[in-house]
Image (cartoon, rainbow, N blue to C red):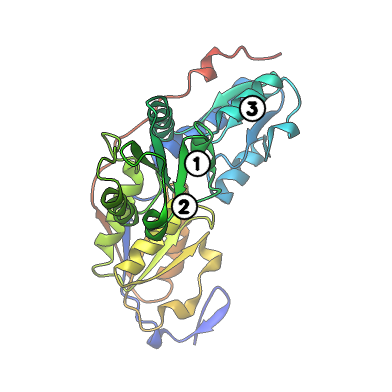
């Protein structure tokens, strides 16, 4: 008998031979930017720095920034008047901006530019008199922020069944936008249903699903051709991570969403020779590498292969507020 993490196991029933790493995986440009916004703000400004909600949906990232001095709050009434405050990558509604102004907060907006694009689309469609159908998940931070841009014009659609039932005042004046972190396949099915219902449906000129979400889903499909079990590193409230699990399952593979190596169960790999591994857009790479080390201990000479589907070279500049706000003290 051997041991792994202090527990006995029989390597003869765990014949792991290969780990396949999906690439792209992990941080996207929007997450990189949001984290840098917090770190730069902490370095540049004296006094406390507050962050409204999780800057990105990952507890490891939030705890890392908290340890550096960031103070995370749920709502702005918890922030002292006049304080430096960062808005998360998921975006906020105009009402939140107004509340910040009333409290005279020095705001630095870390909203992902791709989410901002959806906000701009919502406002444009509303000005032009469209009923806007937003495909997304109720109460997700991104959806709450987007709906706040034009609440009188936007209706939420979460499923194909809801798309079949939804009614609008003018069927000839309907537009569709989407949460950026959804499954391409699920979104496509809903949009096709809406097109059947509303033949004059107007969509943005470019797909709202972000490049990183799309690339990570395609990479999961690629590793699912060989991997029997797929692990997705990500938080329980990370929409794009949940979608990666769903994509793997649609491809016929068992898939598990885990925060880190501590959540792995050895029995998942009984009789499994090839494991796939990826991570959501807000999961740090060091968590992936820790899981690789954990998995390699399951067998002798376990091979590690990385399948790179596309190379990402997207980068977003820092928000202008970071350089315009005058440091206190």
Q: Is residue 62 above or below residue 22?
A: above
Q: Which mark is residue 239?
A: 2
Q: Position of residue 98 (x, y in %)?
A: 63, 23
Residue 87 is left or right of residue 274, and the answer is right
Distance from Cα at disc 3 to Cα at disc 1 = 18 Å
Q: Nearer the viewer, mark 3 or mark 1?
A: 1
CB atoms at circles 1 and 2 under 8 Å apart?
yes
CB atoms at circles 3 and 2 under 8 Å apart?
no
The answer to whether residue 179 is visible is: no
Q: Position of residue 225 (x, y in %)?
A: 23, 68
Q: Nearer the viewer, mark 3 or mark 2?
A: 2
**Residue neighbourhood size for the residue with mark 2, other residues' Cα within 10 Å, grouped as few (<14), some (14–19), many (≥20):** many
Q: Secondary structure at mark 3?
A: strand
Which residue lies at the image location 64% right of the left edge and 36% below the top edge? 68
The answer to whether residue 234 is visible is: yes
Q: Is residue 300 above or below residue 127?
A: below
Which residue lies at the image location 53% right of the left edge and 59% below the top edge? 259
- The residue labelled by disc 3 is 85
* Disc on the earlier residue, 3 or 1: 3
- The residue labelled by disc 1 is 142
Dividing the picture into quadrants, the one containing residue 186 is bottom left
Residue 129 is left or right of residue 324, and the answer is left
Q: Position of residue 168 (x, y in %)?
A: 41, 44
Q: Is residue 198 above or below residue 297?
A: above
CB atoms at circles 3 and 1 under 8 Å apart?
no
Q: 99 or 67: nearer the eye?
A: 99
């Amino acid at each position: 008998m051997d041991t792994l993490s202090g527990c006995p196991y029989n390597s003869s029933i765990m014949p792991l031979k290969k780990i396949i790493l999906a690439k792209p995986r992990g941080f996207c440009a929007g997450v990189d930017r949001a984290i840098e916004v917090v770190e730069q703000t902490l370095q540049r400004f004296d006094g406390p720095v507050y962050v409204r909600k999780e800057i990105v949906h990952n507890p490891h990232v939030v705890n890392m920034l908290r340890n550096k001095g960031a103070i995370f709050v749920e709502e702005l009434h918890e922030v002292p008047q006049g304080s430096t405050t960062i808005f998360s990558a998921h975006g906020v509604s105009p009402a939140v901006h107004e509340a910040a102004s009333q409290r005279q907060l020095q705001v630095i907006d870390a909203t992902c530019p791709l989410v901002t694009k959806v906000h701009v689309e919502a406002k444009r469609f509303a000005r032009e008199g469209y009923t806007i159908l937003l495909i997304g998940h109720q109460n997700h931070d991104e959806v709450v922020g987007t709906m706040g841009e034009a609440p009188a014009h936007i209706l939420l659609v979460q499923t194909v069944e809801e798309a079949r039932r939804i009614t609008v005042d003018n069927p000839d004046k309907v537009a569709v936008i989407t949460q950026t972190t959804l499954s391409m396949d699920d979104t496509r099915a809903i949009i096709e249903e809406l097109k059947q219902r509303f033949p004059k449906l107007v969509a943005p000129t470019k797909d709202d699903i972000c490049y990183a979400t799309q690339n990570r889903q395609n990479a999961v499909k690629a590793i699912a051709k060989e991997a029997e079990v797929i692990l997705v590193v990500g938080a329980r409230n990370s929409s794009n991570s949940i979608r990666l699990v769903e994509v793997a399952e649609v491809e016929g593979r068992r898939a598990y969403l885990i925060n880190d190596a501590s959540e792995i169960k050895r029995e998942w790999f009984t009789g499994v020779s090839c494991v796939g591994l990826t991570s959501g857009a807000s999961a740090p790479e060091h968590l992936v590498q820790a899981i690789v080390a954990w998995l390699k201990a399951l067998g002798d000479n376990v091979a590690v292969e990385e399948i790179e589907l596309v190379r990402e070279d997207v980068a977003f500049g820092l928000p202008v507020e970071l350089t315009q706000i005058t440091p206190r003290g």
